């Protein structure tokens, strides 16, 4: 005769409660569709950007990095349901050629204006609060 081991009911209740809390904490930290993505800037406010001269990547948790020719731009973004809020990046740490400085300044300005976004299969468009596009990006490659 085999004996079945039965867990006490109180233990079962505690186990269920722990599972529910774990599931709730996991759903609160859901990935956004932009997590771990890399982009090449194609235009800023309608002005074309030379291919490969400005890049943007979005890591997990809203970590955002860009490079427009004057060094790395690091900041964070709150992203959710088509909305994006990007913290103002710090100013560049080094001097650079005038064209790169202009592009860097334009990227920083566009990022600070971004309020919403629309993502396609290989495209990302950032819009300001009025709905005007401030930056268009495409997937590299």
Image (tube, grey):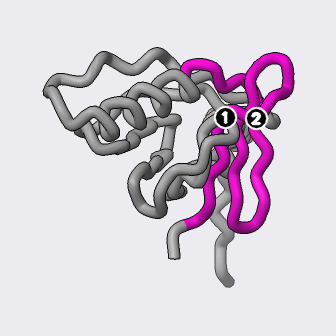
Q: What is the x, y in percent for residue 21?
A: 67, 32
The residue located at (38%, 33%) in the rendering is 104
The CA span between labels 1 and 2 is 6 Å
Establish if 4 lies above or below 104.
below
Q: What is the x, y in percent for residue 75?
A: 40, 27
Q: Quadrant of residue 94?
A: top left
1 and 2 marks in contact (CB < 8 Å): yes
State which region is magenta: 112-139
| Upstream in sequence: badge 1 or badge 2 | 1
Is residue 2 visible to us here? yes
Q: Nearer the viewer, mark 1 or mark 2?
A: 1
- 61 inside magenta stretch: no
Residue at numbered disc 2? 133
Residue at numbered disc 1? 45
- 136 inside magenta stretch: yes
Q: Quarter of the image containing the N terminus?
A: bottom right
Establish if 51 lies above or below 82.
below
Looking at the image, the residue that sits furthest to the right is 131
Q: Secondary structure at mark 2?
A: strand
The residue located at (80%, 36%) in the rendering is 82
Residue 84 located left or right of residue 97? right
Residue 32 located left or right of residue 93? right
Crowd around label 1: few <14 · some 14–19 · many ≥20 (10 Å): some
Looking at the image, the residue that sits furthest to the front is 98
Residue 141 located left or right of residue 118? left
Instruction: Give me the disc on residue 89.
Output: none
Looking at the image, the residue that sits furthest to the bottom is 1
Crowd around label 2: few <14 · some 14–19 · many ≥20 (10 Å): many
Q: Quadrant of residue 105?
A: top left
Q: Nearer the viewer, residue 15 or 120?
A: 120
Q: What is the x, y in percent for residue 126?
A: 70, 37
The residue located at (17%, 23%) in the rendering is 93
């Amino acid at each position: 005769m085999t004996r079945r081991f039965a867990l006490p009911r109180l233990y079962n209740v505690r186990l269920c409660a722990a599972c529910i809390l774990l599931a709730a904490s996991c759903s609160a930290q859901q990935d956004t569709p932009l997590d771990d993505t890399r982009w090449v800037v194609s235009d800023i406010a309608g002005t074309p950007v030379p291919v490969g001269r400005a890049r943007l990547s979005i890591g997990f948790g809203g970590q955002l990095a860009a490079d427009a020719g004057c060094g790395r731009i690091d900041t964070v973004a709150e992203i959710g349901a088509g909305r994006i809020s990007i913290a103002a990046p710090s100013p560049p740490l080094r001097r650079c050629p005038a064209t790169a400085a202009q592009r860097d300044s334009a990227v920083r300005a566009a990022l600070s204006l971004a309020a919403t976004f629309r993502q396609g299969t290989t495209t990302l468009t950032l819009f300001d609060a009025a709905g005007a596009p401030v930056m268009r990006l495409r997937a590299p490659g």
